[in-house]
Amino acid sequence: MNLDVFLLGLYIFFGRLADMTLNAFRVSLITKKKRLYAALVAVVEAIIWFLVVKKAMNTTVESLFIVLSYAFGFAMGTFLGTTLASILDRSKLCIRIITTDKNETLIEELKKADIPLSFFSCEGAVKEHYMIYIVATKEQFKQIKEIIEKYDSSAFIIVNENKEAINGSFLRMGK
């Protein structure tokens, strides 16, 4: 393999890495309803993609290295983009913990861990249950899950991303 093919492969790899990273980030923006930012990212993404494809298609060199550079750039960009989108995602989680009885120990342990929560009784299909309602960060969820597993391993847990949390203890905590 000569130096020109190697450099072209690097150009293609890093170009695809960049445009696919932006692609994953743009999709994340779309799901968060940030359409203007998504559109701006799409412009940059499309320019990079166009330049890479133009360069790849205009070469007379037939090399598996060029194809693999394109494919691995695509794959690594997808991986990097989804990883960055996950790291930059600051959305809150809505966590509902349903227990078969009022688990005072679980509630107290969550409170000791500075987890703001609400709890109340709720009607199940067959009998009454107890629900603990928490709005937390993704970082806090690991700790919350460990506490639940330790003090009520049979609890039914529902976790959803929460678009917005207004007022309440969560916002006063500064976390």
Image: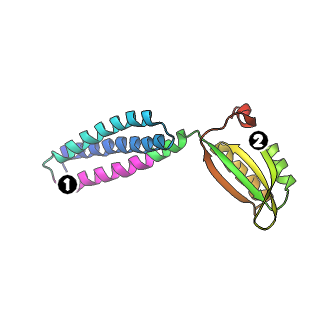
Q: Does the magenta stretch include residue 91?
A: no
Q: What residue type is labelled 1?
A: Ser
- Residue at the disc numbered 1: 63
How far separated are the C-alphas under marks 2 and 1?
59 Å
Question: Which residue is found at the position 78% from the left and 40% from the top?
Answer: 114
Q: Which residue lies furthest to the bottom in this view?
A: 126
Q: Is the magenta stretch mostly helix, strand or loop?
A: helix
Classify mark 1: residues with Cα within 10 Å, few (<14), some (14-19) or many (20+): few
Segment colored magenta: 62-80
Q: Which of 66 and 97 is in front in this view?
A: 97
Q: Where is residue 144 in the image (x, y as percent from the top left)?
A: 72, 49
Q: Does the magenta stretch include residue 68?
A: yes
Disc number lying in front (2 or 1): 2
Question: Which residue is found at the position 63% from the left and 45% from the top?
Answer: 138
Q: Position of residue 105 (x, y in %)?
A: 86, 53
| Residue 11, picture quadrant | top left
Q: Is mark 1 on a helix, strand or loop?
A: loop
Q: What element carries label 2?
A: loop
Q: Is residue 127 above or below residue 171?
A: below
In the picture, measured across the screen, residue 89 lies left or right of residue 151, that is: left
Q: What residue type is labelled 2?
A: Pro
Q: Position of residue 125 (x, y in %)?
A: 75, 66
Q: Nearer the viewer, residue 32 or 115?
A: 32
Q: Can residue 108 be seen in this view?
A: yes
- Residue at the disc numbered 2: 116
